[in-house]
């Protein structure tokens, strides 16, 4: 298959390289010249485990090329995935101007039948607008289909998620589009290309028949599956965070409660970790966008308001917990471990660390911080308002308290005794429930966590 992917960010780059690994010829387009030049030189602009070697190998084989030119990519491809950003507007709605802009440019360039696929996360009905935009701007009446194919990958495990997904969802209006999209994904459907999570490598093997569910729906249902899925996951997190707050009042332990709940296969044990709340480029914006499109279509989805509210309050409660542990925050020095919104990524969009550190700085505290990969990105948020350290121990050295915000493996296995002796006061405030309270007390820590 000849495939174009427009927008070479987290989703576009991972999709492009994985389609190339499946044997397709892929052209990745981005209007950020600097990014494209870097990619051409084999420099990967984001941190994503396993991504760099895969990009370099596929570019070397000629199956993956990078360009800034949409017309070149459109003319050479039959299936065109749009993977540009859909960031939040101040109203909470999704900003669809990038999608509209690309749809127009695709329409101008089309010279034969194309399937134009929304891979970006978009509100229901966007497909209708994309179709209309292409029809108005494609004056030669070239045949085309618009399809939806939401992406469910997570940052930090993106390649594994793309090549071994729980399901592939496509929303189409024609058999022809469904067949072409199935062909794009065939090696993933039959798992002839899969991913070894432990070794972090792609495996090529004989097809195993249909292993991955390939769900074909209409365009609106497919668009809705994405918003409904992300919002449900966010709801699960807000629910367990609300339960955690209740546990603190009731003298219960949220970890035990979550385990007891999760053993019920109808509930499941995933996404029941209480903490400082969800962040990232997707849950916050997608829950808001889902709420807004619901209102626009005439349904007041109040439940989602609460999901957002609980998440916001969760950060505020954590800041209050820090103040309570310290009494006075002004002029104290805090060691902050973890800046990215979750482990295994350098992404800091909507990261809880931003609100928490800003609150400490506003109170007149000093902050020393360490993150295994997100410190360069962090400098864009905090400039020189915080001090960066080389590892957890130098961060803790001479600090008045330690705050853990992101549960990187490196922190789970650090030498707690050494941390204890490095700190001025043995105050450890854990926003991710990484350690056992009894064990921490045995070491001598004044240990604070969430819902326990
Ligand atoms: P991103 O910001 O990392 O990447 C978007 C890219 O599109 C940028 O490189 C930008 O330069 C490029 N772009 C913008 N306008 C363009 C144009 N006119 N022509 C060519 N390129 C253009 O965003 P992302 O995180 O990859 O997210 C993309 C979409 O996928 C969003 O809708 C997001 O909600 C969705 N999504 C993201 C994830 C994730 O984990 N990040 C997972 C699933 C779905
Ligand atoms: C999420 C979804 O998991 C993906 O399926 C989806 O494709 C993606 O959004 C998207 O649409 O962009 P991602 O944002 O990369 O992926 O990360 P998650 O692992 O889902 O974590 C999101 C946030 O929730 C993080 O801040 C994480 O710390 C938090 N979280 C997660 C919890 O607080 N508790 C949990 O139990 C799980």
Image (cartoon, helix red, strand yellow):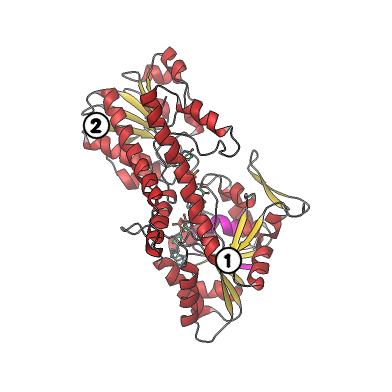
Decide: few, some or many residues near mark 1? Use Cα within 10 Å; few <14, some 14-19, many ≥20: some
Toward the viewer: 193 or 352?
A: 352
For marks 1 and 2 on the same chain, the one whose residue lies earlier in the sequence: 1
**Badge 1 element:** loop
- How many marks do you count on the picture? 2
* Residue most extreme to the bottom: 140
Q: Position of residue 287 (x, y in %)?
A: 42, 52
Q: Position of residue 122 (x, y in %)?
A: 46, 61
Question: Eyeballing the image, is 109 above or below 2?
Answer: below
**Badge 2 element:** loop
Toward the viewer: 24 or 276?
A: 276
Q: Quadrant of residue 382?
A: top left
The reply to whether residue 449 is in sight is no
Question: Eyeballing the image, is 334 above or below 343?
Answer: above
Quadrant assignment for the N terminus: bottom right
Question: Eyeballing the image, is 173 above or below 254?
Answer: below
Query: Which residue is at 45% across, 24% downward?
Result: 253
Gap between marks 1 and 2 measured at Cα:
54 Å
Quadrant assignment for the C terminus: top left
CB of mark 1 near ligand 1 (< 8 Å): no
Query: Which residue is at 31% across, 41% downward?
Result: 355
Residue under pointer 2: 365
Q: Nearer the viewer, mark 1 or mark 2?
A: 1
Q: Which residues are magenta?
A: 2-17
Residue under pointer 1: 218
Q: Position of residue 131 (x, y in %)?
A: 50, 75
Is residue 20 found left or right of 349 in the rendered image? Answer: right
């Amino acid at each position: 298959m000849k495939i174009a992917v427009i927008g070479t960010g987290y989703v576009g780059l991972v999709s492009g390289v994985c389609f190339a690994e499946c044997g397709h010829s892929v052209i990745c387009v981005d209007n950020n010249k600097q990014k494209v030049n870097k990619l051409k030189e084999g420099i990967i602009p984001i941190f994503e485990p396993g991504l760099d070697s895969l990009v370099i190998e596929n570019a070397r084989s000629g199956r993956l090329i990078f360009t800034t030119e949409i017309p070149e990519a459109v003319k050479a491809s039959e299936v065109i995935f749009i993977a540009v950003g859909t960031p939040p507007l101040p109203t909470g709605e999704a900003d669809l101007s990038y999608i509209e802009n690309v749809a127009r440019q695709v329409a101008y360039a089309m010279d034969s039948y194309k399937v134009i696929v929304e891979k970006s996360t978009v509100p229901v009905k966007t497909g209708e607008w994309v179709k209309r935009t292409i029809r108005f701007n494609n004056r030669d009446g070239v045949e085309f289909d618009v399809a939806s194919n939401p992406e469910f990958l997570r940052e930090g495990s993106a390649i594994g998620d793309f090549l071994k997904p729980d399901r592939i969802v496509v929303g189409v209006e024609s058999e022809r589009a469904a067949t072409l999209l199935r062909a794009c994904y065939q090696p993933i459907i039959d798992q002839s290309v899969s991913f070894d999570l432990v070794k972090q490598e792609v495996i090529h093997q004989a097809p195993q028949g249909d292993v991955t569910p390939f769900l074909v729906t209409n365009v609106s249902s497919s668009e809705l599956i994405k918003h409904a899925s992300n919002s449900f996951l966010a709801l699960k997190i807000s629910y367990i965070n609300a339960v955690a707050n209740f546990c603190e009042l009731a003298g219960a332990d949220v970890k035990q409660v979550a385990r007891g709940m999760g053993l019920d296969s109808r509930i499941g044990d995933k996404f029941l970790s209480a903490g400082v709340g969800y962040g990232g480029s997707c849950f916050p914006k997608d829950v808001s966008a889902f709420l807004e499109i619901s209102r626009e279509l005439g349904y007041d989805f109040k439940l989602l308001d609460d999901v957002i509210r609980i998440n916001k309050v969760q950060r505020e409660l954590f800041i209050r917990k820090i103040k309570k542990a310290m009494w006075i925050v002004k002029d104290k020095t805090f060691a902050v471990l973890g800046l990215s919104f979750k482990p295994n990524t350098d992404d800091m969009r909507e990261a809880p660390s931003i609100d928490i550190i800003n609150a400490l700085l506003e109170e007149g505290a000093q902050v020393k911080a360490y993150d295994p990969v997100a410190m360069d990105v962090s400098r864009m948020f905090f400039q020189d308002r915080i001090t960066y350290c080389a590892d957890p121990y130098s961060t803790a050295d001479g600090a008045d308290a330690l705050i853990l915000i992101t549960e990187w493996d490196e922190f789970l296995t650090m030498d707690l005794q050494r941390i204890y002796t490095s700190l001025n006061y043995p105050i450890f405030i854990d926003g991710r429930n990484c350690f056992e309270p009894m064990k921490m007390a045995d070491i001598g820590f004044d240990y604070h966590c969430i819902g326990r």
